[in-house]
Amino acid sequence: MRKEQHFKGWNEIKTNDSWAIFKIMGEFVSGFEKMSKIGPCVSVFGSARTKENMEFYQLAVDISKRIAEAGYGVITGGGPGIMEAGNKGAHLAGGTSVGLNIDLPFEQHDNPYIDSDKSLDFDYFFVRKVMFVKYSQGFVVMPGGFGTLDELFEAITLIQTNKIEKFPIILVGTKFWGGLINWVKDTMLKAGNISEKDLDLIKMVDTADEVVDILDSFYKGRSLSPNF
């Protein structure tokens, strides 16, 4: 009897999974339709827990303002912290400010600096990440937590495996990211788990000027288009 009840529950899960396909498909369709009309953007990532009085909040504002002034839109995860700072910088420059919000039980709420017609809501992290990767001309990665690392290494992996076109991945904060990059070099590379050229996919900087210089240098003579 217990075995029968167990498998009955399993069958119900499979049925629910099948219907979830339509919700997932709806998020993809809505996201593609809206994002395809926005134009070239750079995504700014970082911790939702960064407060307005912290160093990296203001640096994210400055960087995003410079990105917008250079002609790119700014995409963030739409929430507080570094995400808010990114949208704020774009807003101050009069640039395109996009927020890809995710429904979470804590932390996440949309910030007031997103353009009213460019705020998108997602239930699924993986759909949201597709939008970041497809429509970003570069990733600017400020100090953050597990979510920031997830987005960073997803992009590196997709470029490394030639699943998407190469774009700049810029880590901001050498003191914050230096230990991670040293570990990648001293452990992953020495173990033969990555190649020397994979390290070229990442740049590490400390200033807004460096971020914009990398973006402009990369796209000089290149077309701006979705990555796949």
Image (cartoon, rainbow, N blue to C red):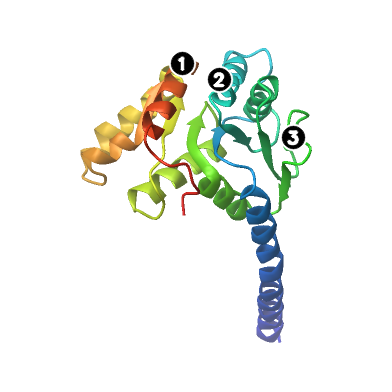
- Which residue in the protein does label 1 denote? 209
What SS does tag 3 mark?
A: loop
> Front-most of 175 and 203?
203
Q: Secondary structure at mark 2?
A: helix
Query: Residue drawn at (64%, 43%), measured in percent from left and top?
Result: 38
Q: Residue at x 74, y 34 (%)?
A: 115
According to the picture, the residue beneath numbered tag 3 turns out to be: 115
Spatial CA span between label 3 and label 1: 25 Å
Q: Which mark sits nearer the N-terminus, 3 or 1?
A: 3
Around disc 1, counting alpha carbons within 10 Å, would you say few (fewer than 14), some (14 to 19), or many (20 or more)?
few
State whether residue 180 is above or below residue 174.
Answer: below
Q: Is residue 187 above or below residue 143?
A: below
Q: Position of residue 173 (x, y in %)?
A: 46, 20
In the rendering, at what x and y percent does residue 228 appear? 46, 54
Q: Which residue is mark 2?
A: 66
Task: Tell me which numbered mark, 2 or 3, is placed earlier along the sequence.
Answer: 2
Q: Residues within 10 Å of mark 3 (few under 14, many from 20)?
A: some
